[in-house]
Amino acid sequence: MKKRVLVVDDEEGIRLLYKEELEEEGCEVTLAASGEEAIEKLESDSIDLVLLDIKMPGMDGVEVLRKVKEKWKDLPVILCTAYPHYKNEFGTWASEAYIVKSSDLRELIDTIKNILEMKQ
């Protein structure tokens, strides 16, 4: 069965890039443009991993992470952001991984694969 990844990012170009790359790796990808939409998708869909941006309008990624870990304790979350300095903030520590956005997606793809393999 394909693993289902929820990609949460307010930038459409990033969402579509990650969707294309993850589908090439055999994942089924669901997209959300906001934290609020991400929570709605988690309520209605079966998701194996969340790929989450931090800086978003409305509910930011740290708040989404907190809500996810409160309700879906075992659901892995990878924070993927353009801002390396958030890694030291306490609110981000509950994530399984913290990746700084890059044009080279190898680290991101490898991290997703590793986390999904460990989850099995």
Image: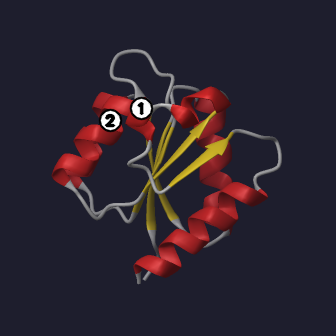
Residue closer to the observer: 58 or 19: 58
Distance from disc 2 to disc 1, alpha carbons, whole Å, reads: 5 Å
> Looking at the picture, does residue 115 appear above or below residue 39?
below
Quadrant in the picture for the N terminus? bottom left
Instruction: Name which residue lies at 62% across and 60% down.
Output: 22
Q: In the rendering, at what x and y percent does residue 78 appear?
A: 50, 51
Instruction: Name which residue lies at 39% across and 32% down.
Output: 62
**Residue pushed farthest top?**
57
Q: Residues within 10 Å of mark 1 (few under 14, many from 20)?
A: many
Left/right placement of residue 85 relative to residue 120 reads right
Residue 116 is labelled as none
Q: In the rendering, at what x and y percent does residue 34 appear?
A: 39, 28
Residue closer to the observer: 69 or 29: 69
Residue closer to the observer: 13 or 102: 102
Q: In the rendering, at what x and y percent does residue 9 appear?
A: 51, 33
> Looking at the picture, does residue 40 appear above or below residue 119?
above
In the rendered structure, which amino acid carries the disc numbered 1?
A: Gly
Q: Residues within 10 Å of mark 2 (few under 14, many from 20)?
A: many
Residue closer to the observer: 116 or 66: 66
Query: What residue is pinned by disc 1?
Result: 61
Element carrying mark 2:
helix
Quadrant in the picture for the C terminus? bottom left
Left/right placement of residue 104 relative to residue 16 reads right
In the rendered structure, which amino acid carries the disc numbered 2?
A: Val
**Residues at badges 2 and 1 in contact (C-beta under 8 Å)?**
yes
Residue 64 is labelled as 2
Left/right placement of residue 81 relative to residue 78 reads right
Which picture quadrant has residue 37? top left
